[in-house]
Amino acid sequence: MTSPPRPDDAYPYLRAASAGIRHHTRSLDSPDAAPPRRADRLHLDVLHAHLTALLHLLDLLAETTRPPYPAAGRHLATAHTRLWQATSEVHSAFHLLPADSAAKEAEASACRPERLPEGPPVLTICQRHLAAGHVLRRKTTPTDLRPHTTACAR
């Protein structure tokens, strides 16, 4: 259930982004829809772009929160690291999915990678991922980036 928008809402775009994700999730999970669509590369590319935008937002929030409230800043930094791990897994899944043959043909005929400053479309997710990873690695240690387990080892 979503909360109704407030007239004093200070973050309308963030609320709209969340509503968009909820709408997308409901449309994928709709019982009266045709067989559920599987994830494709374009879907994961858009999701990766959203996750990297969230990474940037969490990074800024952690940096501005840490000086006056160190404990809250540490929690935000930890959330940032966990979100990076999720972003990295989405990036890996993108490369494990087969390329859509129709999209490949359209790309080959219409796209001239040498003319695009960001390179071929399939590489934009990699460039975005490398840029986000570079920012993250300046502020974290390799130990921070390892997945943590919550189970007790006996």
Image: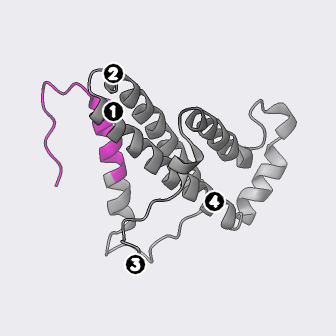
The amino acid sitting under disc 2 is: Pro
Mark 4 or 2, nearer chain start: 2
The amino acid sitting under disc 3 is: Arg
Mark 1 surroundings within 10 Å by alpha-carbon count, few (fewer than 14), some (14 through 19), many (20 or more): many
SS for dot 4: helix
The amino acid sitting under disc 1 is: Gly
Disc 1 target residue: 73
Disc 2 target residue: 67
Mark 3 or 4, nearer chain start: 4
Q: Nearer the viewer, mark 3 or mark 4?
A: 3
**Real-space Cα separation, disc 1 to disc 3, in angstroms:** 32 Å
Disc 4 target residue: 92
Q: Quadrant of the N terminus?
A: bottom left
Mark 1 or 3, nearer chain start: 1
Q: Is residue 3 magenta?
A: yes
Residue 79: x percent and y percent?
38, 45
* Residue at left offset 68%, top offset 60%: 95
SS for dot 2: loop
Mark 1 or 2, nearer chain start: 2
The amino acid sitting under disc 4 is: Ser
Q: Colour mode?
A: one colour
